[in-house]
Amino acid sequence: MTRFLVRRLLSAVLTLFAVSVLSFLMFFGLPKDPVSGMCPKNCNAERLERVREELGLRDPLPEQYANYMKGIVTGRDLGSSQGGRCDAPCLGYSYVNSEAVTDTLARVLPVTLSIVIPAAVLWLVLGVGLGIISALRRGTALDRLAIGFSLAGASLQLYFVGAVLLLIFTYNLRITPVPSYTSIFDNPLKWASGLVLAWVALAFLFSAIYARLSRAQMLETLSEDFVRTARAKGLAKPAVYGRHALRAAITPVVTIAGLDVGSALGGTVITETTFGIQGLGRTAVDAVKAGDLPTIMATVLISAVFIVVANIVVDLLYAAIDPRVRLR
Amino acid sequence: MRLKRAAAAGGALALLVVMGACSENKGTGGGDEADRVQSGSIATDPKESMGPAAEVPGAAKGGTFRVIRETKISHLDPQRVYSFAGLMNAPLYSRFLTTFKDDGAGKVTLVGDLAETPGTDVNKDCKVWEFKIKDGVKFEDGSAITAKEIAYGIARSFDPDLTGGPTYLQEWLADSPQYDTKWNFKANKSSLPPGLTTPDAKTIKFEFAKPHCDLPFAASLPYTAPLKPEKDTGVNLDNQPFSSGPYKITKNTAGVELVMERNENWDPKTDPVRHAYPDKVVWTYGPDAEAGANRVIADNGDDQTALAWNGVPSALVAKVSGDAALKPRSVQGQTPSLWRLTINTSRVTDLTVRQALNYAIDRDGFIKAYGGEASARAVTTLMPPSTIGFEKYDAYPAGPSGNIEKAKELLAGKTPELVLGISDDSPELATQLKGNLEKAGFKITVKTIPTDAKLDEVGKKNNPWDLYTDQWAADWPSGAAILPVLFDGRTIKAENNSNTAYVNSDEINKEFDRVLAMPAAEQGKEWAKLDKRIMTELAPAVPLFVEQGYYLHGSKVGGIYLSSIFGYPALTNAYVKQ
């Protein structure tokens, strides 16, 4: 197991290195001058040149990359136009936000985490639960209801569901407050009430997919020989379904869930835009619109970290669920 | 973000400018101010520059006034403020050398803000200016504001790190667009830029190499806000400016919210324009225009005391304008941003063709394609109605939909082939213009220009287009900041031209010099005459429309009106109904 873990971690580090090199080359090595997006409109040629110098854009690319990575590990001194000393992990300075990119991320990451993690718990519990119940009650009214629910969820879009939820619960019934983010440590109730519509919208759409997937996997597993054997040996239904069938059926669901949560943490752009909450996704989009390269680079990197970490977690869960994986 | 900025213009400041009709609107908010025409004056009596500002009827102190906006204000550091949101917000926490007293209906008076008057032209040649600083003006820590802190504020605007703000004063003092190389702020922090002196604590003096009669106007921009050197945190001041206005910033979370609370050291008796009725002003960032407007329409809880800064989006215009209950909560009116179809006169050299274009234009159709009456109001002049001295005229009367027959008559059977350059984000405008002009006999070829590059591309002298849409919003409401900037042929260079019509008439250029040399009191009418003359004799553009502002606020907000200077909601009269 340790060897497996070490192998996966090494591969994750390599993946992140490749992503960082590629994104750095993409943003700083292409012919388009990155400074024009960073320097405001009244920049003349001389000022642009000074910004290039300060950003180290006149240095060879490998040196620029090394400085960037060094900043992440040990921090670095940026010019006076970028606020001076930038402590580790330094991801550069945003001229658009007038602050270190690390500060921006420190502010928006908790927002995205607060949206995604509770929503993921909701959609997994609701989706997987509904899928399994539907499989076990195949052909009943409950099954048909679950299929209808998952069809509706799969065919709707978040910006529509979100707008409808806002219209009903916030603007008309006035049950929920206007969506906003408050730190869970400052006021847990306000934190929950400000994000509940985003959770519901995300959970509704995602749980529909998980309900369909879980139902199909469960039905397939229930028709396997080992389930019939277990039942024939006289094992109780809960033990067969819970200990044997569910364990086998859940494996693909874990894979999909890992990827979904990983990519959602990388930025729930549509959710954040629909509900007007500034998280990582919206920050990335704003940075693209404003040509704020240090912020774009940082959001790409952090999203890659989420995906890679989610993959490691999935692999570990796989190994825990299916002993055969550990042997490979 | 300002799409265009007025360049410096000369002229002579005089004692009093009163042009056009005055109106009685007290800027108490509500209603449609679409047809207002500017009248303006420059105060001479120091009493006009003293406070307290006249009470807004019905206003009361207290409460929290909120502003909902999609994105954060780009800069808060007064020396870097230049966006419309920033310009409207900065007076809440900063004071400047001069400022505009605005009745919200088009009557503006330039008064002293920190200065006792809007300045003295010492030698009557617009080269040496003196401002005397008021007694009793203070920073948020209670220390006195003197000429030294104001001069330091102006000096730091030379710092190349502090990008984003206007550059009139810096360029005028250094007598060069490369002002930051002429005087190095970082190396000379204990001194002042050339031409800027403080003979004593109450006096700040500007000495220019060339006459700059618009200085009192230019001094109303936020870069004249004072700062104590020990409070200068460089680029970080952008997150936490040091207040000299009625509020101080108590919390600023970029992209989330900006909280301003009462500055107890601000003395209303020294302030001719600010009221500071609410105890607190909070900008909340995040919701897009539609979400912001929907929140204010729903009028729940905190949103009852909120203003939707991003305005009423086109998707909600019908709903809002059709709801009588929302009328008292809406503020509509013109902005100074004027759109015109610029004719590249270096390519379209035949005056009759340019005149025919003016007859052919279907302004109604163009405005419909742009977004309708709520977004734009037709004009036939080169200066917007919000300009001091504005006079309405139509050099080519053709009705709201144009006069195709008259255009054809002028063309006399010719079918001029014209290339229309249009931003790639507005193909609907190109389709409308092409359809409209081809009916009159023009043959229009549409070529798109990347939106981001359009300003640069049409600013190139030898650009390949005959027609393009342009817009201009001056930083102060004077014809001097519009006509010479846009139509003085002597300023044409290889790139970065504001004169995108590339018109160059010796006669008109002489007129610019003549008017700019006149006392400001007499300039307004002269600019109006020159506006008409340019259109009649040169027809370098087809005036299209001025943009309209359309805003909504909650039921407990009062005192919002559209700034006569910038066309955005002014916040200095805002109050929360108790």
Image (cartoon, grey):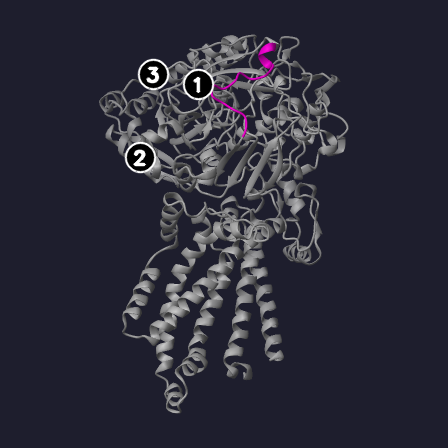
Give the residue number, with chain letter if any, for mark 1.
B105
**Residue A95 shown in magenta:** no
> Residue A291, how many percent across, how many down?
53, 46
- Tell whether label 1 touches label 2 (CB within 8 Å): no
Question: For residue B318, which numbered disc appears in the image?
Answer: 2
Residue drawn at x 42%, y 21% is B384
Q: Residue type at mark 2?
A: Ala
Q: Left of B182 or right of it: where is A328? A: left
> Residue A321, how many percent across, how many down?
50, 78
Span colored in magenta: B47-62
Q: Secondary structure at mark 2?
A: helix
The one nearer the camera, A55 or B93, is B93
Using the image, name the chain to which the residue with label 3 belongs: B
Give the residue number, with chain letter if any, for mark 3.
B395
- Tell whether label 3 touches label 1 (CB within 8 Å): no
Q: Residue type at mark 1?
A: Ala
Using the image, name the chain to which the residue with label 2 belongs: B
**Residue B52 shown in magenta:** yes
Cα separation between marks 2 and 1 = 25 Å
> Residue A146, how many percent across, how many down?
32, 67
Q: Earlier in the sequence, mark 2 or mark 3?
A: 2
Q: Residue type at mark 3?
A: Ala
Q: Secondary structure at mark 1?
A: loop
The one nearer the camera, B317 or B306, is B306
Res B233 quadrant in image: top right
Crowd around label 1: few <14 · some 14–19 · many ≥20 (10 Å): many
